[in-house]
Image (cartoon, helix red, strand yellow):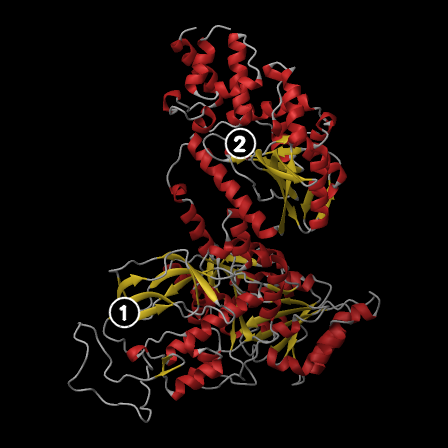
Amino acid sequence: MSLITYREAMRQAIRDALIRDERVFVMGEDVGHYGGCYAVTLGLLEEFGSERIRDTPLSESTFVGAGIGAALGGMRPIVEVMTVNFSLLALDQIMNNAATLLYMSGGQLNVPLVIRMATGAGRQVAAQHSHSLEGWFAHIPGLRILAPATVEDARGMLWPALNDPDPVLIFEHAMLYNVEGELTDEPAPVDISTAAVRREGSDVTIIAYGGTVRTALGAADQLAGDGIAAEVIDLRCLRPLDTATIVSSVARTHRAVVVDEGWRSGSLSAEVSARITEEVFYDLDAPVARVCSAEVPMPYAKHLEDEAIPQVADVVAAVHQMRS
Amino acid sequence: MTSDEARELMRSVLHPIAPEADLDEVAEGETIQEALDLDSIDFLQFVTGLAEATGLEMPERDYPQLSTVEGCVRYLTSPH
Amino acid sequence: MGDFTMPSLGADMESGKVTHWLVKPGDEVKRGDIVAVVQTEKSEIEVEIFENGTIDELVVPEGGRVPVGAVLAHITTHAPVKAPGARVSPPVPARETGPREGGRPSRQGREEPTVKPTSVHGALVESPLVRHLAERLGVDLGSLSGSGLGGCVTRADVERAASRSTKREARRERGGRPSSSPFARRLADELGVELARISGTGPAGSVIERDVRRAALAAQPEEHEVKVATAEDRQRAMQRAIGALMARSKREVPHYYLSATIDLSVAASWLEQSNLDRPVSDRLVMATLLFSATARAVKRVPEMNGFYVEGTFTPSEAVHLGVAISQRSGGLIAPAIHDADQLGLAELMARVKDLVIRARSGVLRSSEMSDSTITVTNLGDRGVESVFGVIYPPQVALVGFGRVREQPWAEGGVVSVRPCVVATLSGDHRVSDGMRGGRFLSEIERLLQEPEKL
């Protein structure tokens, strides 16, 4: 066991993949010489050379398209889009090429592409650079959407994602990179289709993913002090959603709160809420609550940004509200 | 049969039908059915039990006599 | 001296019945205390008093029904409450204003307001703000008792009345059911607690899980103690189960009721004759004939015999007649006599006797407990004239017989005295209606005129 950062865990995962499979290469803005905007690929250019760690021009549409082409050609590219905010420029490539080629080619053309993106708010990078769009991407058939929230998942999700014959998007919440966690010395691959119960409880189920998992766990700690045993579920895989784990938990606790850093309207939390209602309506003691970002473009000022994104206090208040 | 024997017989016949019943609690003039909350089937069983023990025919027209404690005792002790 | 009047608990409420008084003369009350339980068309409502004071006299006794606005009790009010937002009405011209000096009439230790507003609506005049608010919120000012100075209606009173009627309207739109979470509803069903009786502590007064659990515990406090399963416990458990079943039946089954008085003179004389030839152990009772007629009548009106499950009625080919048997320590069970329509009277009698004996000693078979396709209840021996029972779900009918008694009978212009019994039917309106129910009772009557054929 050793204590490493989420960033380090992701770097190890990439390094591991580069070593094990020569078809794997990394491509993106500033991934090589700069070592990556978030320093995830730091040192990899020196270790693996410029054929395998490729700096790209400042054009998401181009290099995501190139990645799709490389995948079609038999490579296993890891395309790094600096943040989800810039993925908007490659949305057509992702949605209309990567996600659809398999279906449009009648099963002939797999796109075994992995796209990694940083996501989320909290660093005062304001309205255009603070989006949480995992929910948008989870809307698209043909894509697998992953949100590693722990060091173990950061280390373990990449390899199975690379081995998936179809496109996989991995969202890394930017506030997680510095978070430390314990990792075994022999990390095993993790599955990329199920949710995980991070904390067991019987009074309410708090459902979170990516950056909000820590918020949910913090809220659970506080609620325990109030005599409320909260169960925390880390969704891990946003598409396909592990509905079974979610509803079996809510069936036991009878109350659910979804913590989603996206805006509530039309968000992933709305999807989770709908599925809960569809499956375990008759077990609900209260409507499914959602704690989401305020419906405003993300503010720049620190105190306003803090107000806008889901905090532990908001989750605790939501739980108390549903029990009052 | 003596009065005491008659009462004893009534008690033992009543017991499986109404275990908590106490003959002594039946007031004079009160019917056994009312006092001990017996329905028509219970009463028939009571009469059947008495008939089997005594060999008497106990026609339906005699039921009114059997409905009070004194009447029943008299019926059982008088020669037939 | 103040009056506590029958409040308006709904826009269409005309009168209410005081089911319980929770205070008595001499009790001190303060604003917000619940002093009575009033029954309206839909439910029982706990009514608060809006004044501080002492109860002088309960004018309407428990059980009394009075119109909205009628005086329910007299109270001696204490110092008027300064409600937030209380408004004393501005002086209206041609009325005395200002504190009265000297000549103050009351010296009885009661407070009188220094400014006495005049009456409009038969109550006290309210400020324009309050009047406008009441108009906007659709609250009838005349129906409110005010908590302000001198009994004035305040803004808070109006808002409170408005929110009460909104909740009630919402409840009415939901069919009068209290708002409750899906899980609470399911739990109430499982625990045999009547949802309508639970007061909810959830958002907007909805009933949630903990309210149901609390109500269930209140109904069975003994659950907490370590119990040895004594006969008493079993008895109580059975009563609870019966209670729960009856509550569910009343909730889910739309009952309709019919009764018919049946002339038993033919049956009674046949019975007497028949019993003359029978030894005691083989004698029949009138109940046997009644049960037999019921079981056979079912064949003519099959909507009385079968099970209603999940929205569908499945008639039963066989007639398994459930016979309600009371147990000596209280409690009622209704085991089945299988194929009761096929049995002769002697056989039926023997089965009934056997069931009674075994029911009282608690040795019944599970098929007897679960197979009844229709149930009959005969309380005649207890002196009851007629009995309108509650259907045992999933059955769809319950037949009741009262006491066989002599009564005058007019026929062909001549009055005679005949032994009669009142036969009743409680029917499930989802499966049958009054026409078919009436047909059924007529058939029972017809069969009882030919007892030799039973």
- Would residue B9 appear left or right of A100 to someone viewing this image? left
Q: Is residue C425 visible?
A: yes
Quarter of the image where one finds residue A187: bottom right
Point out residue C424 in the picture as x, y percentages from the top left corner.
62, 42
- Callout 1: helix, strand or loop? loop
Nearest the camera: C396 or C228?
Answer: C396
Nearest the camera: C367 or A205?
Answer: C367
> How far is mark 2 from mark 1, CA to CA?
54 Å
Q: Looking at the picture, which amino acid does disc 2 mark?
A: Asp
Label placed on residue C381: 2
Label 1 belongs to which residue? Answer: C52
Q: Is residue C181 above or below residue C317?
A: below
The numbered mark, 2 or 1, whose residue comes first in the sequence reads 1
Q: Is residue C369 above or below residue C30?
A: above
Q: Is residue C324 above or below residue C254?
A: above
Nearest the camera: A92 or C6?
Answer: C6
Q: Chain of mark 1?
A: C
Quarter of the image where one finds residue C153: bottom left
Point out residue A176 in the picture as x, y percentages from the top left corner.
50, 70
Q: Chain of mark 2?
A: C
- Callout 2: helix, strand or loop? helix
